[in-house]
Image: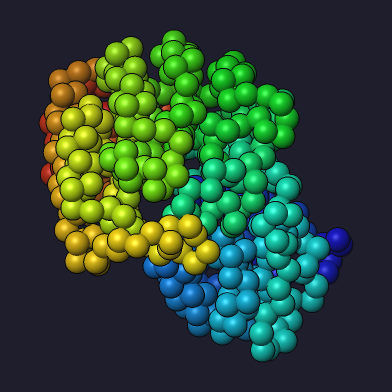
Amino acid sequence: MDATLFPHKKAAYYTLGCKLNFAETSTIGKLLAEQGIQRVQPGEQADICVVNTCSVTELADKKCRQAIRRIGKEHPGAFIVVTGCYAQLQPGEVAQVEGVDLVLGAEQKLDILHYLHDLKKHGGVGQVFASESRDIRKFMPSCSADDRTRHFLKVQDGCDYFCSYCTIPFARGRSRNGSIASLVEQAEAVARQGGKEIVLTGVNIGDFGKTTGETFIDLIRALDQVEGVERYRISSIEPNLVSDEVIDFVAMSKRFAPHFHIPLQSGCDEVLKLMRRRYDTALFRHKVEKIKSIMPDAFIGVDVIVGTRGETDAFFEDSRRFIESLDVTQLHVFSYSERPGTQALKIDYIVSPEVKHARSQTLIELSSKKFKAFYEAHMGRKAKVLFEHTEKGGQMYGFTENYIKVEAPFEAAWINEVREVHLGGWNVDQTALRIEPSVCPHS
């Protein structure tokens, strides 16, 4: 496409949902920039708005609709393109939202240039281009940098698991991935740009290799050899796919951080069966104990869903007790949301919104207790911190290898640098640990 087709055009980008979406939005932005479309600056009016949506819950759908309408008011006359999971699952519904001109499904989103023409609004219902989920086969490489210091590298997409409550396989298609060689090239490019930390993202990253005949352990071994990258973090990985071999490798690797995010979803075996998860609580406990036995300071984040269909009071109490017994750091608690087309809708027992809320609060309080204990156990210790760009009230922030947030007096020379510090006590709002005064930049 000739860049002169879009002379002096400006675009605004909006991303809702996961880090994978952020990586893909970044790639879309690069594609449009290559055609002469510049990113809009604050206060400017956009000619095109790209909205990358989420559909993990009913609330997410609602937020997407609200965002689209708000964007239309902020940029009147802009050509609005909507893509992402909500656009794939409910393209007709999205096309009806006021102001939408173009709806692109999962297979089409990174071919956006093929669907853009004169950027003129035509009114009425937006045009829809979306393949059936079974036809989503293409792996589209994506890598993005956030406004801090880390990059998000997409290594895998799609999912073959079909858990009873989840629409992701319908929104993103079957499991597929890039090649190890191509991903190493992207990591090397990040290092050349000065990037110090890379987070490996995907839908089910432990399932890496379905389309290339490679394995996840081979991927992380190859990435560990890339010079210039200080750290890698593995984003959410299924309990049955975080193999003992992967855990052992992270423990002895040069660059992989002792930081795991493992979805549990329920600590009750009966509920796990209803969810059609591929493990039980015994396997999950083994993984946590394995990690802690060789990396006692590892940060372990855990996803939990409360109030799913079939979760009786007794089942929830089993789950709570199991989670309380685990040496994990933090819980990410979600309330179950009914999703059309999922097998969970066939389960009879329904949990009321009030009970869901109460259960959520119970686990959030448990999470706070575990999180606080983890941070306090590290007070007084040395740690290597990668500091970020953000300045707030004269303070800067960064994270240790095991994902403890650290606060220090702002010093420009520390941005995007790893510094060894002594961890002190809590900061004022208890969101981070202060560094000891003896190593403060201005001391």
Q: Is residue 67 left or right of residue 326?
A: right
Task: Return the x and y of residue 128 as percentages of the image width and height.
Answer: 71, 73
Q: Residue at x 54, y 53 (%)?
A: 168
Quadrant including the N terminus:
bottom right
Quadrant including the C terminus:
top left
438 versus 122 height, above or below: above
- Please give the count of numbered marks on the rendered protein: 0
327 versus 96 height, above or below: above
Task: Return the x and y of residue 401 as percentages of the image width and height.
Answer: 36, 25
Q: Nearer the viewer, residue 39 or 307?
A: 307
**Does residue 43 appear in this view?**
yes
Q: Residue at x 86, y 62 (%)?
A: 2
**Does residue 433 appear in this view?**
no
180 versus 3 height, above or below: above
Task: Return the x and y of residue 164 as percentages of the image width and height.
Answer: 46, 52
Q: Nearer the viewer, residue 133 or 19?
A: 133
Task: Return the x and y of residue 407 as percentages of the image width and height.
Answer: 25, 36
Q: Nearer the viewer, residue 229 or 207?
A: 207
179 versus 317 height, above or below: above
Q: Residue at x 30, y 63 (%)?
A: 350
Q: Is residue 2 left or right of residue 272?
A: right
Judging from the image, the colouring scheme is rainbow
Location of residue 293 by image quarter: top left
Q: Is residue 368 left or right of residue 217?
A: left
Q: Residue at x 29, y 20 (%)?
A: 289
